[in-house]
Amino acid sequence: MTRHSDPVPPRPVLACACANLRRAARAVTQLYDEALRDAGLRATQFALLETLRLKGELTQGQLGYLQAMDSTTLTRTLGGMRARGWIRSRHGDDRRERLWSLTSMGRRKAEQARPAWELVQKRVQSRFGRKRLLSMFDDLTAIVAAAS
């Protein structure tokens, strides 16, 4: 058992892109989830609220594409957010199409969470470096494109 004062050994680089990306995603998600907990949000929910705030009304397909989320996970997450009153949906021209948008309650929820998000964002940037972080954003966007 490691005591808090004991140095934590570095984690090895794994030979698999998927394993490395998933490990990083889990670690970062835990950090953001903890920061957003007092606002009553998870990182995934905050990202969806922010996407709708910035882009306006979107189809579920557009949201899934922008977030690279599978349909089942997205449907479950959106359903919970709709039940809380943060987002609303309506049918599009094609009855199979569903359009999603923020409610005023969802906008307030995102505004409530934004200061905590900004703090953790600054924390990550200070530990990783602004230039490296921006480069990582570009690299991750390219990885998503390559995997699609």
Image: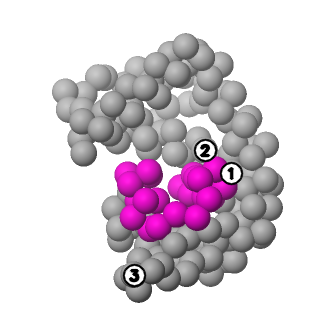
Decide which of tag 3 and tag 1 comes sooner along the chain. Answer: 1
Dot 3: element: loop
Residue beneath disc 2:
32
User: Considering only order in the chain, which callout, 2 or 3, is on the residue closer to the N terminus?
Assistant: 2
- Label 2 element class: helix
Element marked by disc 1: helix
Q: Distance from label 3 to label 1 (Cα)?
A: 36 Å
Magenta stretch holds residue 6? no
Q: Are marks 3 and 2 in contact (CB under 8 Å)?
A: no
Q: Which residue is drawn at 35% across and 71% down?
A: 72
Amino acid identity at mark 3: Asp
Relative to 50, say whether 115 is above or below.
above
Q: From the image, tell me which residue sits under label 3.
A: 94
Which residue is more in the foreground, 108 or 92? 92
Question: What separation in Å lies between label 1 and label 2 (alpha carbons)?
Answer: 6 Å
Q: How far apart are marks 3 and 2 (CA)?
A: 36 Å
Q: Where is residue 50 in the image (x, y as percent from the top left)?
A: 63, 52
Kindly identify the residue that appears in the image at 51 percent across and 73 percent down.
99
Q: Which residue range is magenta in the image?
A: 44-68
Tell me which secondary structure the magenta stretch mostly adopts. Answer: helix
- Locate residue 17 relative to residue 96 in the image: left or right: left
The amino acid sitting under disc 1 is Leu
Q: Residue 51 at what x, y percent from top left?
A: 58, 53
Query: To which quarter of the image does residue 40 belong?
Result: bottom right
